[in-house]
Image (cartoon, rainbow, N blue to C red):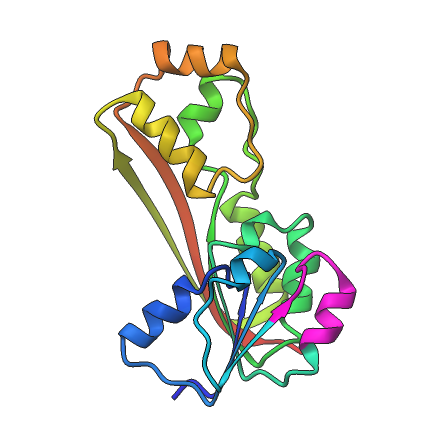
Amino acid sequence: NLGKTLDLGCGSGRLYRALVKESKSFEHFYGADFAESMLKLHPKAKNIELLSADFNTEESFAQLRKLGAETLLSASALQWAKDIDFTLEQCATLAPFAGLFLFCSGTFKTLHKSVGLRSPIHSCEKIESAFKSHYKAAKIEKYNFSLPFATTLDMLRYIKLSGVSGNLQLSYTQMKHILENYPLKYLEFETILLTGESRC
């Protein structure tokens, strides 16, 4: 039993579903997300409470602190924090233990390079440094993997639908350049898994 668990950036509940599938149970599960439309898709139950929250604001963290969570989880969300040090500092005030999974700036590295774009998300090094500032007994695991595609057009469709690209908007010229010149048959991903005990 994971006790009182808070999923920050819970989206439609993918992490919750995965944990339940692994036979994990909760005394209480809190799901927090900025997108109301995603919260509507999240599983509902007596011990699930869903809240609208923005992990870029002090106001939202003040609201979340009142929950008294024992474990903070987040998967594929916090890479969009405007100020990762601020967000992780605030995260450390929410629960004694955290397990966080984030995408890093090496994700879509060749794609970004081919059209002269800088990654919109933080580097693994910056995320790790911020995490270690606010968590002790930190365990850091980095993973690099690739996802193959039959065609470059399939790859671009995936990017549009995946949510990993955030608000990235490619111009017609950039799209054409990628279709004609992208050198790989796959997309690159760089991720980091962080676990630790809050220093608060």
Judge left or right: residue 85 versus residue 32.
right
Dividing the picture into quadrants, the one containing residue 121 is top right
* Residue at the image point whose x is 63% and y is 72% from the top: 92
* Residue at the image point whose x is 42% and y is 24% from the top: 111
Give whichever of 123, 36 is nearer the camera. 36
| Residue 2 on image: x %, y % | 42, 85
| Residue 18 on image: x %, y % | 33, 68
Q: Which residues are magenta?
A: 51-64
- Can the viewer see residue 17 in this picture? yes
| Residue 80 on image: x %, y % | 59, 48
Q: Is 23 drawn above or below residue 163 in the view shown?
A: below
Number of numbered tags placed on the structure image: 0
* Residue at the image point whose x is 43% and y is 11% from the top: 176
| Residue 149 on image: x %, y % | 25, 30
User: Outermost residue toward the right?
Assistant: 59
Quadrant (top left, top right, bottom left, bottom right) of the C terminus: bottom right
Quadrant (top left, top right, bottom left, bottom right) of the N terminus: bottom left
Q: Is residue 89 magenta?
A: no
Q: Is 137 drawn above or below residue 88 in the view shown?
A: below
Judge left or right: residue 16 versus residue 52.
left
* Residue at the image point whose x is 48% and y is 25% from the top: 112
Q: Is residue 54 magenta?
A: yes
Judge left or right: residue 21 versus residue 84.
left
- Can the viewer see residue 107 in this picture? no
